[in-house]
Each structure stands twice: as structure tokens, then as C-alpha cells.
Image (spheres, rainbow, N blue to C red):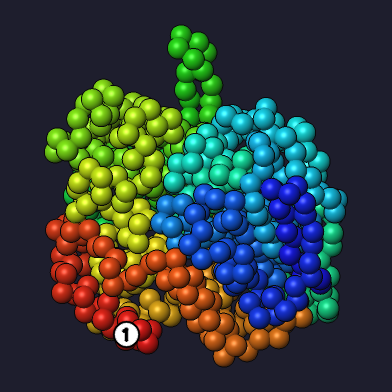
Amino acid sequence: MLRKVLYIDLSRGESWSIERQDLFDEWLGGTGVGIRLLMEECPEGADPLSPAAPIILSIGPLNGLFPVATKAVATFKSPLTSELGESYAGGRLHLAMRFAGHEAIVIRGRAQGPSYISISGGKVLIKDATSIWGVDAQTAGMILREHEPGMGRRSIIRIGPAGEALVRFAGVVVDTYRHFGRLGLGATFGSKNLKAVVVSGTERAEVPDARRYREVYNRLYAKTVQTDAMEKYHDIGTSVNINVLNWLKGLPTKNFQLTSFSEAEKISGEVFADKYLFRRLSCAGCPIGCVHIAALKTAFSPHHEFEVRKVSYDFEPIYSLGSNLGVSSAEGVLQLIDVCERMGLDVISAGVVLSWATEAYERDMITPQETLGVPLQWNNVQGYISALEKIVKAPNEFYAALARGAEFASARYGGQDFAMTLGGNEVAGYHTGPASMLGQLVGVRHSHLDNAGYSIDQKAAKKQLSPEEMVDEIIKEDNSRGVFNSLVGCLFARGVYTEENIIDALGAVGIAKTGEDLHLLGKKIFDEKYKFKTREGFDLSRARLPGRFFKTVSTLGKVTPETMEEMLRIYRKKRGWS
Ligand code: SF4
């Protein structure tokens, strides 16, 4: 299998492909290759919205060849945090890149005017996107589906108006229901005048020994579908966690003022499944089908017929646009998700920005003049819809500040104590204890998925863990996820891809690795990412922990600043940092 990188320069309108076996031998693929290419391509201190800041899309050696190896990773300099940007998406992109014969795509420069990239049949074309600029992300996808080749073997990734307006937490919609949601990749697309990338192809992936490949494939497939390793993701899906976390007192409510929501039952996964679930979908190459789609009946326009909008949901949007905003109806949550989908906004950041603004408004730190009359109040869905639309249009200084994220807005208007960000990124839906806080603070992209600290807290709720044991678990996850994300698998399939199975799967595609090789690689990828982060200004010793975390009771009780200081000290020592 030739392992190639496709380079596209939007400023010069050129593209070329280079075989980079050295790169893939050393960094495996996915996130390993992504961070290495970012180090090669991104000049130190580059403005994340300048032509100099690249976008890197990459897949790994198992994509398209093994079940649930279904993700692609985007690596970039984040417009939200100004350091490492990294985001993962399912859908069909990983498979389309395999068919197109490119394991990594580097996009440089800035197009002269609205454009999209079409990669198909060995050709790369930069096409005029004037007619779809300004169009919402879903409609843009529908139009491109009509005009671009490769149906059935194609992926269409695109931005909505939020990315075009450079909202710092704009995402990229991938094949309608999946996203490169976090850290502002949508704004990076917008800054390059890039509306969309369409990828398709007909290349085949060869394996050195078909019999061995089939044997490993069948074993992994059986583990995926015949054990309970992934059962919960199909049934109610991750939204089942609304009731669970509410019961555990770990569900952030009204901007983390509470950790249980009196109305949680009304927005639980069970209610969504019972009243709104319309169908389930899968990313290409996954037999699980955890993508839950709700049917939302809305008025087509005032006084006109109804239309049914299809809206994907899971735990994180129900937290960020539901409990965290005090929204107590499933329909209200779906309406807010739908607006974010059309605008192309990251739902977690959007919800946390609005929850900070609601509290600041309640405390008279923001005036009705500044909100332009929009009432920012818990559970006021119409007010929130109006605010989201204004964040994208930025009609005044206040909304322009919100468009830069909660960290920026709170630095400008006050209330940093309750601006729920870690490392500048709006936090995910857990206040389970110190491991969740530390995990997001030290994680390479400040995401709950860097090391799943929330799950370490939940383990500690059953059997006490010392601060040192928690730190050990965080470091182990940080490193091992660097390897898994180089493959690039769906994190829900971690139980399928044990170290032994990863070694077997890699062996079946001709890549010989030992457990020791993988451990060293995981550490090396983590170190490379931290090299980029510190180079771009991230300093863990100055990272802010919002005071709200220490005031609100978590699943493991109140977390004290002393506990966090101790865990940070242990973490630094174990990482070998002074
Ligand atoms: S489990 Fe869900 S997110 Fe993961 S690959 Fe399957 S459908 Fe996609």
C-alpha cells in the first residue's frame, strides 16, 4: 500500500502528491502523522486564521480495512485557543480518503474567493463556491451532492455561515450528521475561503496476506457485534448518560451551578428514544449504528405547513444545550441543536458560551442594550436561538465577543470564575470529580476524550483511588489514545481494540509492531503535541481552573484547590516536567 500525502495550495491553485513512507513508518498514521505534518507546515506563531496556518486531514492504516476504524482526524492551529487544534469525525471521510489513495491531505494558503476542493479520480480541482457561500451547512451538502461525482464512495465536508463569519468555535459538518466539531476548524476553513472539501475515489487497498487479514477481521467483527462491548451505543446511545450522571450528581446544570437537574427525566435519552427517535445510522464501516436521528416537526414558515427536520443527538449536545441551559424539553434541545447544525457551530462551545452569558446577564454584568433585547434566561429556547443567530452575525461588540468563546468574553465582561473553560476550550458535560478536571486541563486538546478523566472519577466512586492512581490512569489513557487515534478508530470501540488486537490488525496489513513499540509511540506522539502547544504559548503552570468547579459538589464530593494542586504536581513530576 503506497502511503501518500496530498498537498493543496489554495493561494497558488496547485496540488501535488508525495509518497511519504518515512512519515508513516515513524508516526503510523492519523493523529501521529497529523501532529508531525502540523509541525512541518505551521510556522511558529502563525495567526490561526492566516493563509500560513495549514489544515491537515489524516487517516490511519486500519481505516477502510477493519470494523469501527471509522474516523478521520483534522489537525490545525486552533482559532479558539491559538494552540493545538485537533478534532475527529466519523461518517464516510476516512473511507473516501482510502478510496482516493491519500492517507493525509494538507491544505495551505487562502483561495482568492469562495471555493471548494473536489478530489476525485486522481484529479484535484479548486472550484468556485460563490453560489453556496452564505448557504447553511445542510443545504450546501445537498447542492454538492447533486453536482459532484462519486456517489456511494464520497464524503462531503462543509462549513455553515458560522465558519464563514470566523466564529472561533465554528465546526465542519461531515456527511450531514458527523462533525469536526471542536476547537474552531470551521473558522479555519472560512479564513481560507474554503466552503467544502469533496473526496471520492476508486482505488483499492491491498493486504499482504488475505487469509491472515480475513481471520483477524472476522475476529474483530465478532467481538464488535457478538459481545456487549458496544451494545449500549446502539440501543439508547450515549444519551443514556443523562439519567446516569444526574443520579451520580455529575450532570452540569445551569452553567455548573448544580450537578443534578430537577427536569433531567424530560430530556433523558429514554425520552428522546421513546418520542423522537426516527432512525439510527452508522459511520461507513461500522456495524453498530450509534448515530441517533430524531424527527423534529417544525413550522416551515409562519402560518405555513409543517416540515420534519432530522436532527442527530447524543449526550454532549443534550448536556450543553439542555441541562446546562436549564432547558427542560427534548423539543427545545432539538431546536437548539438544529440551529447549531445549520449555522455550523460546535454544540458544546455554543452551549457553554450561552450558559456563561446567561449567568452574566442574571448578575447584571451584561445589559439588555448589549444583548439587543434578547432575554438570556434559563430555559428560554427562543431567546437562545436568537442569541445563536446573533453570535454568527456579530451585530455589536457583545456578540462579537461571544463569537470568540467564553474565555475571551469573560476576560472582556468579567465572570471568569464561572466561564467554564479549561485550556481555553469550553468543557464537556461532566462534573464528576478531580480526574475529569485534570484530564481536560492537561489533555492535548483540552477535551474529555483526551483521557476520559470522567470515567476515572466514576471508577473512583466505586473503589477509592488515590490522587496518584488517578494521575497514572490519565497518563496511561493520554498515551494509549495517541496510538488508537493514529489508527484512527472510533473511541467507542476501545474495548474491541485491545493492545493484542491492535498488534494483530497492524500485522495483517503488513505493519509489524510490538507492545513496547506502541507504548513508545504513544508517549512520543503526546510529547510532540506538547512541543507544539508550548511552542504556541500554552503554559500549564498558568492554566486557569474556574472557581465554579470548587464550589459545586461533584460526583466525588467537593473538589478542593489543594487536591488539584497536588494532582498537578504529581502529573508534572511523572511527565518529567519541572
Ligand atoms: S460506534 Fe457510532 S460513532 Fe462509532 S463508528 Fe459506529 S456509528 Fe460511528
Residue 286 horizontal/vertical position (percent): 64, 58
Near-viewer residue (388 or 264): 388
Residue 125 appears in the rendering: yes
Q: Identify the residue at image location x=26%, y=62%.
A: 544
Residue denoted by label 1: 578
Q: Which quadrant of the view contains residue 498?
A: bottom right
Residue 429 horizontal/vertical position (percent): 34, 54
Q: Amino acid at mark 1?
A: Ser
- Residue at the top extreme, as displayed: 303
Near-viewer residue (166 or 118): 166
Left or right: residue 192 versus residue 406 is right
User: Please, is residue 171 above or below residue 334 in the view?
Assistant: below
Q: Identify the residue at image location x=31%, y=51%.
A: 407
Disc 1 is placed on an element classified as loop
Queried on whether the Cβ of the residue with tag 1 lies below 8 angstroms from ligand 1, the answer reads no
Residue 402 horizontal/vertical position (percent): 34, 40
Is disc 1 surrounded by few (<14), some (14 to 19) or many (20+) residues within 10 Å?
few
User: Please, is residue 461 above or below residue 280 in the view?
Assistant: below
Left or right: residue 236 versus residue 135 is left
Residue 206 horizontal/vertical position (percent): 83, 70
Quarter containing the N terminus: bottom right
Near-viewer residue (264 or 418): 418
Left or right: residue 476 versus residue 93 is left
| Total number of numbered discs in the rendering | 1
Quarter containing the C terminus: bottom left
